[in-house]
Amino acid sequence: MSKVLLFIFGSICFQAQGGFPERFLNLCHVKGVKLYHLTEKNGALFAATSLSSFRKIRLCASRSGMRVRITEKRGLPFIYARFAKRTGLFVGIALAGFLLFFYARSVWLIEVSGNERISVQQVKAVLAKNGVREGTLKKDIDYDRISFELYDALGDIAWLNVGIDGSRLCVDLRERVQKPANEDNKEYANVVAAKAGVIDTLRVYEGEGVVLEGDGVIEGQLLVSGVVYHEQSKKNTFHCSRAEIFAYTKETVHFTIPKVYRKTAFTGRSRQYAVLQLFRLKLPLYLFSAQYREQEVSELKQPLFVRGKELPIALYHYELREQKSERCKADRKTAAVFARTKRKAYESKLKKGTKILSCKEKVTEKADCFVFEYHYNFYENIAKTAPIAIENKQKTP
């Protein structure tokens, strides 16, 4: 206990030599000076005393003819005096203590386990909607309500547990076992025409075809029926129709290209800056963030991982690239380049296996734009399934 008090209030280690050591010790006792760790070596006394008692030692030493020299200063008063001018250090220590206290009472990380079909982002979105995210105080979390909201929002949960483990919010769930596909839950469907056209090839794998090769059909027309009537049993059987029906189709596409457009280009100038994220708090690591009048912003996130776990602490790097735009006028040649780009984008989205037999272009110039009209002839599979809504289904034997 004496060591603790000496550290708190401060102590001075000193050396006293010469004169009369016995008289020195007697005078210290009379003056109420307490000496600690008193030793003698080569006729010199070594001891420690409190900061308040050391002021009386010099009087005792002068009366006994001894010389006193300080060898060491210990304790908080001297540590404080050493760092008194470094206010930033104390502010940092206080801030670190506050953050540790705050973080110990908050949720650092949200972990989701046991999920397969339900994504972690879906769970976190439901939690965030109910006010639970990284940085939320533990005392503000209503676990029963959160569990109910997760059940209600996700709907595919058989079992769920929400709890706290240290500074982590753990969501452990089990998804419902899906019933395997079989004849009882089979979806019965017809095959209809996705587009109007003239049928070239008809390949029916299941169901009953109701059109022939060479027939013209319109969009939505029944091609293969999932309901098959049997003359012998006088009953209908239901099927999930499957077919490939290739037909010649036509389609017209319009692209409008304005005569006046804005052209954007990079000037080559750029700026970089960083932002530190602590939970929901973002701390800028820069002094000035001058923005360009026109710019493109790219973001790079570097999260902090501890033992493979991502913490809600990350460093964001931003790059600002200056852009310059100007108004330009498009002539017929420039407009054709833009239209060709849109045409390629359209063709890249066509259904797989579709063949372009021909494409005719027609250009119409108006007061403020060019209109490019493309007339396509396709050869494609126009089969599309359409579910059958039946109340009393007679199953296929």
Image: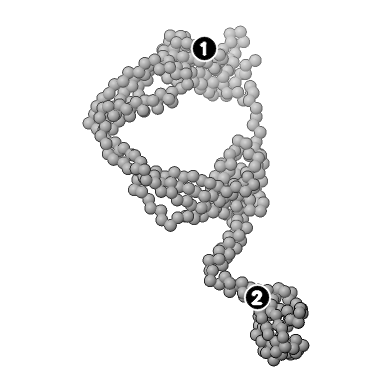
Quadrant hosting residue 58: bottom right
Residue 270 % position (x, y): 39, 46
Would you name the residue on which mark 2 appears? Answer: 73
With respect to residue 52, does 107 lie above or below?
Answer: above
State the residue lying farthest toward the left: 367
Q: Nearer the viewer, residue 164 or 283?
A: 283
Quarter of the image where the C terminus is located: top right
- Quadrant of residue 339 in the image? top left
Residue in the picture at 64% in, 37% down:
175
Tell me what residue is drawn at x 66 percent, y 53 percent.
Answer: 166
The quadrant holding residue 287 is: bottom left
For the residues labelled 2 and 1, say whether their Cβ atoms are less than 8 Å apart.
no
As drawn, 95 above or below 269: below
Q: Secondary structure at mark 2?
A: strand
Q: Is residue 158 above or below residue 187?
A: below
In this rendering, would 106 be left or right of 267?
Answer: right
Amino acid at pointer 2: Lys
Indicate which disc residue 203 carries: 1
